[in-house]
Image (tube, helix red, strand yellow):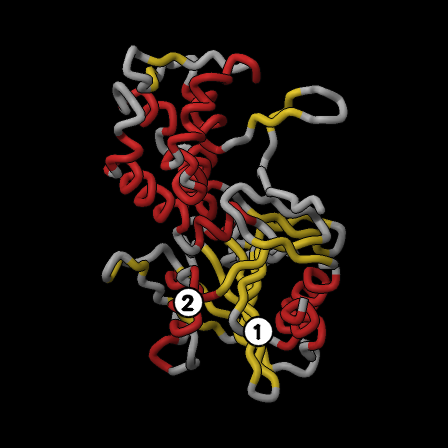
Amino acid sequence: MAVLDDLKAFDVDAAFVSLWIFKSSSGAKGGHPTFRGHWVETTDAVDVALKETVKAERNRLEELIEYDLLAENNESSALRIGRDETHAGLLVDAVAAETENRRVQNVKHLLNSTFYLIKLTHNGEVLYAVRRTPPGWKTKRAISVRTLVLAESRLDIDDSPRFDIEKNIDFFICGEEVLILHKGHFESTLQYKQAHSEDFLALQKEPEFADLFVDLTPLVQHVGSNKIQLRRMCSVHQKAHYRDTDFMARVRDHHTEYGLTLQFNNEGRIIVTPDTGAQVITALLDHRLASGFSKRVYDVPSATPVNVT
């Protein structure tokens, strides 16, 4: 866990901090998102608050879990993935220098931002912490509420623009690794859901996969744009059990023993119905397993082989 040691050893208190604000990607080049942000001057009090958030989120981490399409972390762990496997490098490039032309000049640069990045620099090392903005940064939210402040025991209206900073971090970029605390926010910020959609489209075009089915349409409709289902189909593609003819033969021969009610035509191709879409995905993921101890059958979130010697 060298990267976790590096994260914990980073001297946050002594670091120079800058805050970058980003709106949605302004387009794509070669299938990659384009990140264009602005940095904003902050007071010492804001710098301290940002550093306290980074330290609190860092200090609660005790273990790392390898990122997987279906993996989940808990409050004391983070998912780990290589920076080069994500678009994080593009984000790092976007905040390389706090030049004058990238400085926030007015409130319009802040309104409707989708996420912000805390950049900490110390002794030539840089730590990045990213967080999705709360609803208060949206123009619609800003014009639909009035902020009241208590002054001298009386409520008064405060019409100055207000931007809340969360006390949580969605993910860190530390060296060549990305440490993910909030998977959903990480995937939306770095456009992983779009990558999942594109991967599912590629899977549908793969003859070995498409030929498994009488008609792919019901499965595509079952998956839709749901991010969890898209993750599962990407995992189906990644595991590629469907390419193993012996695996698929056992699915046909033994699915009822495992509580599945799959349907096949006379040629052994899968007939997907509105009621069996989820079961088809479970089978292709190899997520319906039997315990040799309890003799019960389980669905599992990640079927990781164990070497038994």
Q: Which residue is mark 1?
A: 127
Q: Is residue 197 left or right of residue 2?
A: left
User: Which amino acid, mark 1?
Assistant: Leu
Among the two numbered marks 1 and 2 on one chain, the one whose residue lies closer to the N terminus: 2
Q: Is residue 180 left or right of residue 39?
A: right
> What's the CA distance linking mark 1 and mark 2?
12 Å
Q: Is residue 70 above or below residue 172?
A: above
Quarter of the rendering containing residue 143: top left
Residue at 57% x, 58% y is 80
**Camera-side residue of 25 and 65:** 65
Q: Is residue 159 above or below residue 35?
A: above
Is residue 49 shown to the viewer in this render? no
Mark number, residue 91: 2
Is residue 282 shown to the viewer in this render? yes
Mark number, residue 285: none
Residue at the front extreme?
Answer: 309
Q: Is residue 75 above or below residue 245?
A: below
**Camera-side residue of 77 and 188:** 77
Q: Secondary structure at mark 1?
A: strand
User: Which amino acid, mark 2?
Assistant: Leu
Q: Position of residue 196 (x, y in %)?
A: 38, 44
Q: Residues within 10 Å of mark 2 (few under 14, many from 20)?
A: many
Residue at 35% x, 64% y is 35
Q: Position of residue 114 (x, y in %)?
A: 44, 54
Q: Secondary structure at mark 2?
A: helix
